């Protein structure tokens, strides 16, 4: 199997696992969202620690602990991913899986806005059309819901901002997840201690299956991320951009087909506008990547036909 094909397999598996997350979190429903989040954080630290020990990767600890800027960035990333996880778990277990899917559909459009406002990037005309269509979709869905789809907007804003910070930090996935989870582990442990002391903890009191599923939260968090890392190293960025729609499509299917959440005509119209925006965004991205590739090929051909001065025979 070629490396690129292997990368697509890793990426498809990662996004499929993320796509079926609503089923997993529904099974944890006897526990409140914050208890699920706390266990997810703690068992992520445990599992990633085992992975890093198996990889014999310890030197990164000293480098990160000595760099205050890096530590500050990791702390901010940890807060953002904590907000994202908590919002997602709350959305799933409050019968709003469809809205969580919407959040991940509009995340690419939010990332484009971050590029304009934070990175000072200039958008192409069709990118502006995509963003405008996405804004119209949010307006339609606001009318349908009777309020802003705040779960979707918080998911898009938190994950989009998290992605921007992660890009700037440049940490490998396993090491990054370890430190982010470690930052969140202190308040998570404090919350679980308080929950047990007040008798509100569900962990260990529901069923053996529920306890095992809670213990596996770290595995279910880390494995898709590690698969995604394997894909990102082998698949072109355009391919990753297309694969990212697999997860929200599956989440939407879970919400409508498995959990029978309503999809009235107005809501369907809002989603149709989002999908239209994503089609415009994706086609424009493919065209841009193709033009860039042609430009590189032309530059390479021009360089190949030019005879370097050092290669000329002496006169």
Image: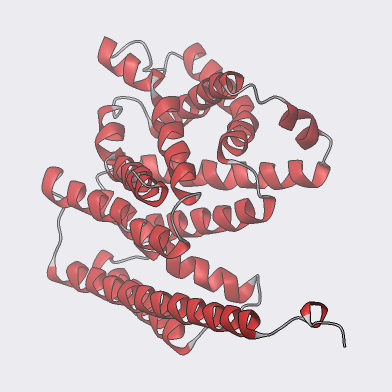
Q: Is residue 106 left or right of residue 295?
A: left
Q: Nearer the viewer, residue 298 or 157?
A: 298
- The quarter of the picture where residue 200 lies is top left
- Name the residue rendered at 59%, 76% in the picture: 116
In the image, what residue occupies the spot 12% across and 48% down?
Answer: 257
- In the rendered view of the protein, which quadrant contains the N terminus? top left
Q: Is residue 162 above or below residue 207?
A: below
Image quadrant in which you'd find residue 45: top right
Q: Nearer the viewer, residue 216 or 94?
A: 216
> Is residue 184 found left or right of 254 in the rendered image?
right
Regarding residue 143, the answer to whether it shows in the image is no
Between residue 102 and residue 1, name the one nearer to us: 1
Instruction: Name which residue lies at 24% across and 45% down.
Output: 95
**Rendered image quadrant of residue 180:** top right
Looking at the image, residue 213 sits to the left or right of residue 312; the answer is: left
Q: Position of residue 303 (x, y in %)?
A: 65, 81
Q: Residue furthest right?
A: 315
Q: How is the image coloured?
A: secondary structure
Q: Residue 132: x percent and y percent?
A: 40, 82
**Residue 44 seen in render:** yes
| Residue 110 picture location, percent across and down | 48, 67
Q: Position of residue 244 (x, y in %)?
A: 37, 56
């Amino acid at each position: 199997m070629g490396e690129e094909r292997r990368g697509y397999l890793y990426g498809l598996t990662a996004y499929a696992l993320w796509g079926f997350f609503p089923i997993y979190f529904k099974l944890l429903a006897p526990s409140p969202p914050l208890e699920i989040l706390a266990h997810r954080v703690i068992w992520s630290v445990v599992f990633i620690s085992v992975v890093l020990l198996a990889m014999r990767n310890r030197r990164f600890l000293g480098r990160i602990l000595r760099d205050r800027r890096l530590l500050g960035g990791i702390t901010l990333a940890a807060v953002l991913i904590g907000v994202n996880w908590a919002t997602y778990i709350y959305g799933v277990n409050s019968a709003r899986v469809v809205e969580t899917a919407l959040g991940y559909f509009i995340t690419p459009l939010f990332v484009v806005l971050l590029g304009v406002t934070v990175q000072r990037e200039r958008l192409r005309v069709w990118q502006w059309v995509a963003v405008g269509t996405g804004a119209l979709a949010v307006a339609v869905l606001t009318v349908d819901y009777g309020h802003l789809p705040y779960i979707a907007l918080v998911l898009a804003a938190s994950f989009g901002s998290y992605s921007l910070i992660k890009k700037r930090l440049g940490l490998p996935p396993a090491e990054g997840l370890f430190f982010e989870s470690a930052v969140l582990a202190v308040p998570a442990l404090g919350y679980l201690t308080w929950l047990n002391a007040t008798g509100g903890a569900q962990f260990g009191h529901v069923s053996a299956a529920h306890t095992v599923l809670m213990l596996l939260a770290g595995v279910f968090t880390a494995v898709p991320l590690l698969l995604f890392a394997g894909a990102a190293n082998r698949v072109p960025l355009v391919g990753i951009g297309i694969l990212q729609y697999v997860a929200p499509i599956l989440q939407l299917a879970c919400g409508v087909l498995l959990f029978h959440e309503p999809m009235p005509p107005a809501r369907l119209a809002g989603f149709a506008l989002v999908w239209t925006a994503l089609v415009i965004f994706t086609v424009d991205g493919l065209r841009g990547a193709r033009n860039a590739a042609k430009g590189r090929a032309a530059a390479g051909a021009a360089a190949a036909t030019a005879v370097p001065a050092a290669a000329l025979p002496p006169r």
